[in-house]
Image (cartoon, helix red, strand yellow):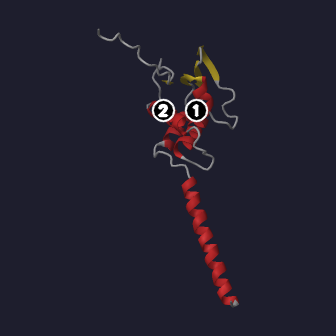
Amino acid sequence: MTIQSTHRYVIAAVLAGTVALLAGCSAMEVKSPPQQKARLLKAAGVQAFRVTCTSDLWNETKAYDGSMDNVTVAHTEGKVKTYQLTGPELVSYLEALDREAHGGVMNTGDNQPEATRMYNALAPVVDTISSRPTAGAQIPSVNLDDTVAAASPSPS
């Protein structure tokens, strides 16, 4: 093998590796919904936002970077809690949910169903937030305390 052919193999191997790396990186990107940036801007400006869910669901979906360590628990009823987030906490939460629900470098997919469910519940409420709330406007909130309807007696 000549030096010239060896160089060609090295160049081909480097190019193949680069293409594979770029393809892998694009697969690791978060595929955020197109409205995500606008949602984050709205979320950043809220004074308070409430999320009611089980503590299990909260712990599975919250951001693990420490940004949500001081979220206020406004109400507790058994395992169901109402968490009250500030604007910056809501931004951190939406970003964490987006990464887990829509892919990303740090996404293991372990919590994708939970994150997708939570993101899909929060997104439409965040979308309705107005930058000029009316006097007496209520705190935006989401309730993910789904319950099973009581079984009706079977006809005899």
Please state the horizontal and vertical placement of residue 20, each as a whole percent of the image.
Answer: 58, 65
Badge 2: residue crowd in 10 Å (few <14, some 14–19, many ≥20)? many
Please state the horizontal and vertical placement of residue 117, each as a whole percent of the image.
Answer: 49, 33
Q: Is residue 28 visible to the viewer in this orientation of the structure?
A: yes
Amino acid on which the number 2 mark rests in the picture: Val
Front position in the image: 142 or 85: 142
> For the point 61% across and 23% down, which residue is it?
55
Amino acid on which the number 1 mark rests in the picture: Leu
Quarter that holds the C terminus: top left
Label 2 vs label 1: CA separation? 10 Å
Image quarter of residue 19: bottom right
Return the residue found at the far front. Answer: 156
> For the point 47% across and 45% down, which residue is it?
33
27 lies above or below 128: below
Judged from the image, the secondary structure of the residue bearing numbered disc 2 is helix
Please state the horizontal and vertical placement of residue 126, each as a whole percent of the image.
Answer: 48, 32
Quarter that holds the N terminus: bottom right
18 lies above or below 33: below
Answer left or right for 62 relative to 143: right
Q: Which residue is mark 2?
A: 126
Query: Which mark identifies residue 90?
Result: 1
- Confirm or deny contact between disc 2 and disc 1 (CB under 8 A): yes
> For the point 57% across and 41% down, which residue is it?
100
Return the residue found at the far left. Answer: 156
Mark earlier in primary sequence (2, 1): 1
Image quarter of residue 27: bottom right
Q: Is residue 85 visible to the viewer in this orientation of the structure?
A: no
Answer left or right for 138 relative to 78: left
